[in-house]
Image (tube, grey):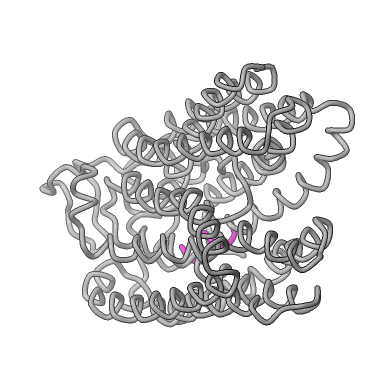
Amino acid sequence: MGGLPTTFWWLWTSTLVNRLGSFVVTFLTLYLTTTRGLSPAVAGLVVSSYGVGGVVGSILGGVLADRIGRRPTLVTAQTLAAVATVALGYTRAPMVIAVVAALLGLTSGCARPATSAAMADLVPSADRVRAFSLNYWAINIGFAISASVAGLIAAHGFVLLFWADAITTLLCALVVFLRIPETRPEQTSAVSESGTSESAEAPVSMGTVVRDGAFMGPVVLTFLLAVVEGQNAVALPVVMGRQGFTATDYGLVIAVNGLVVVLAQMPISRVVEHGSRKAALTSAALLLGFGTALCAFAGSLWFYALTVVIWTCGEMIWTPATQALVAELSPTHGRGRYQGALQLAWQANSFMAPLSAGFMLSAWGANSVWGTCAALGVLCAVGYMLLMRGRAGRLQLAGTDEGETADSTVGDSTLADSTVDGDALDGGCGNNSGASADVAS
C-alpha cells in the first residue's frame, strides 16, 4: 500500500473513524417504529426525507467545495451533521423528525463530494483507483464494526447511538480542522492533467457539468447500475421473505458482502489499477447485473450467498473505478461539482430502487426485477465500451491507464505550489450513511 502520500492516509483514517460511528442511519427505521411508535409507512417517509436531503447536499457540497474550499466545507458539514444527529435523538413530533432527518441528510451529503475532490487533489492519477479502493475498504470495515456493536449500545438506550454517532462525526471534523490545510488548487495557477496552464479556463458551474457530455454519459450509467445494486437491499429481502426465509437469514446472506469486501478489495484493486479502465467498468457492469439476476434461480441460503459474492466483485471494481474516472474527466478547479454530480447519481438510487422494485414486484413478480437487472447490466456494459472508446483522447490527456501516462500534477506540482508542505496536508471525512457506494464514498 506504499506510494500514496501521507496526506491521503489522514483522509483514509478520518473516513474510517467516521464510519465506525455510523449507527443512526442504519438503525433509523427500527428506532422510529419501536422507540417512537411510528407506523412503517410514516417511518419510510421520514427515512426518505433523509434521502432527499442527501440529494440536495450532494450538489450543494460540490459547489461549496469548489467555491470556498474542501476544508471549510468538510468542517462545517460534519459539525452541523453532528448537531443534527443529536437533535434527531431528542425529537418527538413526526414532522419535526422528518425535517431534522432531511437536515442530517443535507449536511452528510455535503461532505461526500468534498471528500472525493480532496482525494483527487492529493493523489496522482496513476494511484487513484487504489486510493478510492482503500477509501471504499475503510467505509466497509467501519460499517461492519459499527453494525456489530450498535445492538449492544442500543440495549442501553437508542439515544446513546445518536451521541456515539455525533461524537465520531465531530472527531472527523476535528481532524480536518486541526491537521488539514486547504487542498483545492488555485484556479489562477492550477495545472491541468495534461500539464498545461488552466488559468484561462472558464469558471465551472453546475451548468458546465450538465453540458459536459463526456462526463454525463458515465453519470447516467452510474445511476442505472446503482438501481441494480439497490435491488439487493430492497427487492432481495422481500423475495426471500416470500420464500419463507427470516430476517436473520437475509442478514447472514447480505453480511457476505462486507466479508468479501474486507478480504478481497485490495487484491482486486491491484488488478484493476494495472488494467484497462474500459475492461474494468465493462466487467463490473456484467458482474453486478448478472450476479443480481441469478437470484431468480436461488432457493437456498448458499445460492443466495453465491449471488452476493458475484455482484460484490462487480461492486468492488465499479465503485473505485467510477470515482477515479470522474476525477480524470473533471477540471482541477471543478472537481467538487463533478464529484457532487456523481454522488447525486448514487443518491437518486435511494428513490428509484424502492419505487422500481415495489412496482415490478406488485405488477409482474420477482423475475421481472431480476430480468431487468440483467438487461441493465448488459446495457451498461455496452455503454461503458462505447463511452470509453469515444473518450480515449480526453482520458489520455488526463493520464489514465487508457493513455498510459501517470499524472503527477495534482498530487505533486499543484500542491507544491501552495504555501503548505505536502506532508502536512491531510484528507477529509468519510460520509455518514450506509456501507453502499454512496460511495462511497
Q: Position of residue 302 (x, y in %)?
A: 80, 77
- Relative to 391, 85 lies left or right: right
Q: Going 71% across and 69% down the picture, which residue do you hit?
A: 260
- Relative to 37, 371 lies left or right: left
Q: Check the image and report above or below for 285 versus 201.
A: below
Q: Check the image and report above or below for 397 versus 43.
A: below
Relative to the observer, which residue lies in front, 50 or 123? 50
Q: Which residues are magenta?
A: 128-134
**Could you say which quadrant of the image residue 81 lies in?**
top right
Q: Position of residue 358 (x, y in %)?
A: 55, 56
Q: Check the image and report above or below for 307 versus 62.
A: below
- Relative to 32, 429 lies left or right: left
Relative to the observer, which residue lies in front, 418 or 18? 18
Give the total number of marks visible in the rendering: 0
Say whether residue 219 is visible. yes
**Could you say which quadrant of the image residue 366 lies in?**
bottom right
Q: Going 83% across and 42% down the picture, which residue do you hit?
A: 149
Quadrant including the N terminus: bottom right
Say whether residue 127 is visible. no
Relative to the observer, which residue lies in front, 319 or 47? 47
Q: Position of residue 256 (x, y in %)?
A: 75, 66
Q: Position of residue 35 (x, y in %)?
A: 78, 27
Q: Is residue 144 magenta?
A: no
Q: Going 23% across and 65% down the picture, which residue do you hit?
A: 214
Relative to the observer, which residue lies in front, 377 or 171? 377
Judged by its main secondary structure, the magenta piece is helix
Q: Going 78% across and 58% down the picture, which residue do you hit?
A: 251
Q: Check the image and report above or below for 389 versus 94.
A: below
- Relative to 232, 421 lies left or right: left
**Outermost front residue:** 363
